[in-house]
Image: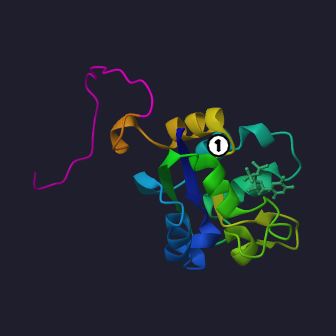
Amino acid sequence: MDQAVLILIKPDGLKKSLTGNILTRLSETKLEIVAAKMVRVSKSLAEEHYKHLKDKPFFPEIIHYLQGDLHDRKKVMALVYWGPDAITKCRDLAGSTNPEEAEATSIRGSYGRITTSGVYENVVHVSSNVPEAEREIKLWFNPDEIIVDLYGTKTVAQKECATKVWADK
Ligand code: TYD
């Protein structure tokens, strides 16, 4: 069954110059990349992304982590992969949440670490199931940033909406 999955290369992955390695590993899945962009993560986006962990003691730290405060890299790379069993394939490649428990050859096993304060810096995010993938993809992307039609859309007319455009256009 074709599925879509949100992948984030987190600030530690970018700081360690792992983008190429991670994309190469993900290409083993033979899935299609249907959206990709760099994102400067606001506090509200990070909090919405991790809202299922709101009550955990490590919540404030993972918000700082996703925003790049711990790595002086205030950006993440967000991608949508699409194809048969995309979620399982990408989660298998990513490995367990805890990098020390992740299989050594997985992305997190290879490149992740646990900080002295106990945060799992595990380099990538991969959606955990179909409803979460839909919620996350809709949170990180607008419909016209994705090159296939994944979910229902509607067209709305926007009045007096200021948009930044190139100065010479
Ligand atoms: P979670 O959504 O449970 O895992 P996953 O990213 O594998 O779906 O956790 C979100 C992030 O929170 C995780 O990538 C790393 C961090 N985290 C910790 O730092 N400590 C923890 O004990 C857990 C469970 C997660």
Identify residue for label 1: 49
Q: Which residues are magenta?
A: 150-169
Q: Is residue 153 magenta?
A: yes
Q: Is residue 141 above or below residue 78?
A: above
Residue occupying the point 88% across, 66% down: 118
Residue occupying the point 49% across, 75% down: 20
The answer to which quarter of the image holds residue 168 is bottom left
* Residue 156 located left or right of residue 67: left
The answer to which quarter of the image holds residue 67 is bottom right
The answer to which quarter of the image holds residue 117 is bottom right
Q: Main secondary structure of the magenta part?
A: loop
Q: Is residue 101 above or below residue 4?
A: below
Residue occupying the point 78% across, 60% down: 96
- What quarter of the picture does the N terminus occupy? top right
Q: Nearer the viewer, residue 142 or 96?
A: 96
Q: Position of residue 120 (x, y in %)?
A: 80, 64
Which quadrant of the figure shows ligand 1?
A: bottom right
Q: Nearer the viewer, residue 66 or 98?
A: 98
Q: Is residue 157 above or below residue 126?
A: above
* Residue 101 located left or right of residue 3: right
Q: Nearer the viewer, residue 5 or 84?
A: 84
For badge 1, the amino acid type reads: His
Q: Nearer the viewer, residue 161 or 54?
A: 54
At mark 1, the secondary structure is helix
Instruction: Report the colour scheme.
Output: rainbow
Q: Position of residue 18 (x, y in %)?
A: 56, 76
